[in-house]
Image (tube, grey):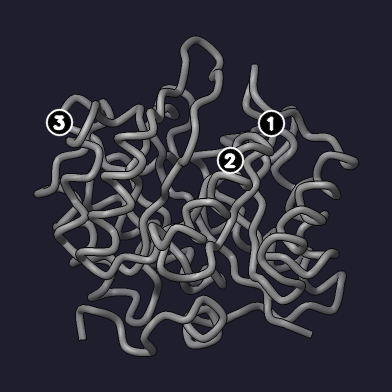
């Protein structure tokens, strides 16, 4: 059975220490939290950065320090930098791509978020994809809607995505796609129909549905995302103690379904990434 890649989304753009003191905000905290998560079983670090006031930013210098620290303390771990729209506007969202991380998130369409429209206009999506090709960065397609899976397929066929896309279903964002098992199953059917039965894919559940979506994904042979970016709670009454604790819970779910957990070498093989990190 294919090992399960666990991606840990360590910080995000929204959670603060007021929400949960375990949220890592400074670069040093992020490196420490990522290292603990790596030791617990995560092989991808999905990364955002914050400014001195704890607000989201796309500052390439901060991304560079975070990337360097992860590569030093978590050798082989896949570094995935976010080009998400809460951290900046326009082409500033891709200002870190010249750092040549292993991967970067790529949202290929717009959708509603809790209090705003998450705008991903076609010209910006095309530019981000072009920058990822230029700097050898593997995109992770963040699909908030069924149309985003079809758009990723169209971009692949046009050569805008040089490799078969790695698609992640994002479910549970308020005003976007809810956590619904029939929708999940249709997403999976669509990915396999468009990209092949053996196409790797991932899923993320937001908030209280994180473990639910982890379980669905692990059971169906996909890969799983966890972490404080998506979910600050352990259960209704308890805050999550750390990113590493959430990773360990996903490891335990893998064990329930007989799925081995991918180490960094497995993850790089599955995602067709060089065995040596770019830091090496």
Dot 3: few (<14), some (14–19), or many (≥20) neighbours within 10 Å? few
Residue at x-position 64% and y-position 34%: 145
User: Quadrant of the image for the C terminus?
Assistant: bottom left
Residue 202, position as x, y percentages in the image: 64, 58
Camera-side residue: 198 or 275? Answer: 198
95 on left or right of 275: left
Looking at the rendered structure, which numbered label has been put on residue 172? 1
Per the model, the C-alpha gap separating discs 1 and 3 is 30 Å
In which quadrant of the rendered view does residue 14 lie?
top left
Which mark is first along the chain, 2 or 1? 2
Residue 162 versus residue 209 in the image, above or below: below
**Which numbered mark, 1 or 2, is in the foreground of this view?**
2
Question: What residue sits right under mark 2 in the picture?
Answer: 148
Residue at x-position 60% and y-position 80%: 262
In which quadrant of the rendered view does residue 221 lie?
bottom right
User: Quadrant of the image for the N terminus?
Assistant: bottom right
């Amino acid at each position: 059975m294919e090992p399960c890649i666990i991606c840990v989304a360590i910080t995000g753009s929204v959670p603060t220490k007021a929400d949960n003191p375990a949220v890592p905000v400074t670069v040093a905290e992020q490196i420490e939290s990522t290292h603990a998560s790596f030791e617990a079983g995560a092989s991808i670090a999905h990364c955002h950065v914050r400014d001195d006031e704890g607000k989201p930013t796309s500052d390439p210098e901060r991304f560079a320090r975070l990337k360097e620290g992860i590569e030093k303390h978590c050798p082989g771990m896949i570094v995935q930098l976010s080009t998400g729209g809460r951290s900046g506007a326009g082409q500033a969202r891709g200002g870190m791509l010249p750092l040549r991380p292993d991967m970067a998130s790529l949202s290929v369409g717009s959708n509603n978020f809790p209090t705003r429209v998450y705008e991903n206009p076609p010209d910006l999506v095309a530019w981000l994809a072009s920058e990822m090709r230029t700097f050898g960065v593997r995109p992770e397609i963040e699909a908030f809607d069924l149309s985003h899976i079809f758009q990723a397929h169209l971009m692949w066929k046009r050569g805008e995505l040089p490799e078969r896309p790695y698609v992640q279903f994002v479910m549970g964002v308020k005003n976007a796609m809810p956590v619904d098992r029939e929708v999940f199953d249709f997403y999976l059917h669509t990915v396999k129909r468009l990209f092949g039965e053996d196409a790797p894919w991932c899923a993320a559940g937001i908030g209280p549905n994180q473990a639910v979506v982890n379980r669905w994904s692990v059971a169906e042979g996909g890969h799983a995302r966890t972490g404080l970016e998506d979910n600050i709670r352990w259960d209704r009454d308890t805050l999550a103690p750390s990113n590493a604790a959430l990773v360990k819970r996903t490891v335990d779910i893998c064990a329930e379904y007989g799925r081995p957990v991918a180490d960094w070498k497995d993850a790089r093989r599955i995602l067709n990434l060089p065995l040596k990190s770019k830091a090496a």
